[in-house]
Every structure is written in structure tokens, then in C-alpha cells.
Image: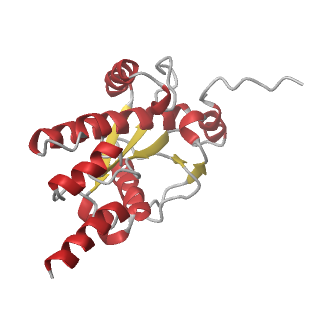
Amino acid sequence: MRQAVHMGPDYSFESAAQGRGLVHIAGVDEVGRGPLAGPVVAAAVILNPACIPDGLNDSKKMTAKKRRMLNDLLWEVADVSLGEATVEEIDDINILRASHLAMERAVAGLKQTPDHVLVDGNLIPRGLTLSSEAIVKGDGRSQSIAAASIVAKIRRDYVMWDLAQHYPGYGWETNAGYPTKAHVEALRNIGITPHHRRSFKPVHNILYQEKYVSN
């Protein structure tokens, strides 16, 4: 028996909510849970059903060129907002809570208050008091969440590229702070910057070793 081919995200979650009388539907997604450095960035997007850009998909499944083109288009045709949580917040409240905080900030920054929010993942941020639903792998299923994943990734990649100009040697302009072999080696050789997440194990271990050696 042939398996159904999954064609990427569609507007069915949004349409279902609109069928229940909820008009403005926001998709929200975050980027940057896994890196050892930099903020976690979220985006919230309310698409105009009459003007949905072609080719929306999980940002990880498209070329950098296509992402940039769709990002520019989304800022023109949709209600788009960004939110982030800092490295200090990540270390203070943990990465899951920080990514939820970034999502809450992104939703709060939209021009219009959404009637319903589609959240990527299996948990709804506790500070999100609006009507909402969590969608596992939502960036590959909902066009609004896919749009949010694109905007968040473009923003976070830019933030890491910018930080790389001030802290060369870690490869942030290409690895976006993820724990690549070169990044981990640079951590050991160059040391830890103020933008590294001290609660993350590879960073914590190096800090601990330095403390141990210096005592």
C-alpha cells in the first residue's frame, strides 16, 4: 500500500479555527534551543488568507535564498512580530521556559491581538493566556507556523552573524552557535564569551575545568 505523500504545511488548522468563529490566527515558532551561544528567538505571524506566499515550509527544509525571499515577503503581506530571550534568561529559567518567554513576547508584539494561537511543539507557554493549541512538528503542518519558523531563523542567523563580527573564531557566522566540532574546539582554545550559555553542559564543563585548574 502506497503511503500518502505529505505535501508540506497547509492552512487547515487556521481554517478549522476560523470555522469556529476565530478570525485572526497566529502561528508561533522559536529557533535556537540547541545552540551553546546566543539568544533564543521566536516569531509570531498572522497570515492574510487572501495573500499567502507560495512555498511556505519548515525553515530547515529550504535554501537560504528561498528563506530570505519569503522572509522579505512575509514582512510585507502579513502581521509579523519577533521576540527573544537572552542568554542570561536562558541560564536563569532554563531553555524551555526561555523559548516560551520568547514566544510570549513575539505574540504580544503583533499589531492585532490574535483570536487563536497555533504553537509549534507539544506545550503551550504558560504566559500565553489567549486561546491556543500546540501542534507537534507544526512548522511542517501549519502555514502560519512555517512562516514564523522562517522569520525566526532569518533573525537569529543575523544576530549570530553580527555577534561573530565581535567574537571571531567560533564560526557563529556559519554554525549559528550550534555545538559543531569547530565551535567546541574554539570554546576550549579561545575560552568562553559573555554570549555563551553557561547552563549548557559543554560550556559548564569548560567553566568548571577552568575553575578547578585555577584553584
Estimate the x, y position of residue 56 in percent, counting from the top left. Answer: 50, 24
Q: Residue at x 61, y 35 (%)?
A: 141
Q: Residue at x 55, y 50 (%)?
A: 121
The colour mode here is secondary structure
Estimate the x, y position of residue 174 in percent, counting from the top left. Answer: 28, 34
Quadrant of res 172? top left
From the viewer's side, name the closer residue of 213 and 99.
Answer: 213
Q: Residue at x 29, y 36 (%)?
A: 157
Where 175 falls versus 67 (above or below)? below
Can you see residue 141?
yes
Can you see residue 46?
no
Q: With 14 as the anchor, is 75 left or right in this view? A: left
Quadrant location, the N terminus: top right
Quadrant location, the C terminus: bottom left
Toward the right, the furthest residue is 1
From the viewer's side, name the closer residue of 109 and 92.
Answer: 92
Q: Residue at x 66, y 38 (%)?
A: 16
Toward the left, the furthest residue is 166
Where 77 falls versus 133 (above or below)? above
From the viewer's side, name the closer residue of 52 and 145.
Answer: 145
